[in-house]
Amino acid sequence: MSSDAIKAVARQFNEEVIEKANRGSFGALIDPDFVNRSAPRSAPNGPESMWNTFENVLRPALTGLSVTIHEQIAEGDKVTTRKTISGTHG
């Protein structure tokens, strides 16, 4: 997969999953063996745990949630995205 293609997948995840809460895109983009390395040690760290965090913690806390991508860097099969997630805390 090219660097541009990898960046496009990361962009799609941010726009479709984080911003729009598209469950179908989440299922299509996340490998069933995904491990969330940023989850607290005592918390589950699989795909469902990540979806639950988005759906039950992040989205209820921020109405009008939006993702702004500032920069993406890809090397080999890895990509990092510098972004801002914003919304109104309510």
Image (cartoon, grey):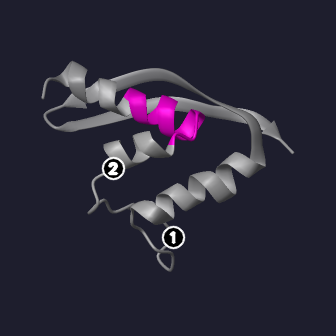
Left or right for 2, reference 41? left
Residue 75 lies in the magenta stretch? no
Q: Amino acid at mark 1?
A: Pro
Q: Position of residue 49 (x, y in %)?
A: 49, 65
Q: Secondary structure at mark 2?
A: loop
Please name which of the two marks, 1 or 2, marks the residue nearer to the observer.
2
Q: Earlier in the sequence, mark 1 or mark 2?
A: 2
**Quarter occupied by residue 76:** top left
* Quadrant that contains the N terminus: top left
Q: Residue drawn at (49%, 33%), measured in percent from left and top?
A: 16
In the rendered image, the vertical position of residue 62 relative to residue 64, given as above or below: below
Q: Where is mark 1, residue-wise?
A: 40
Residue at figure coordinates x 75%, y 50% from the top left = 60
The residue stretch that appears in magenta: 11-22
53 shown above or below 21: below
35 lies above or below 87: below
Q: Specify the amino acid type for callout 2.
A: Ile
Residue at point 58%, 52% (across, down): 54
Residue 71, by quadrant, is top left
Label of residue 30 in the image: 2
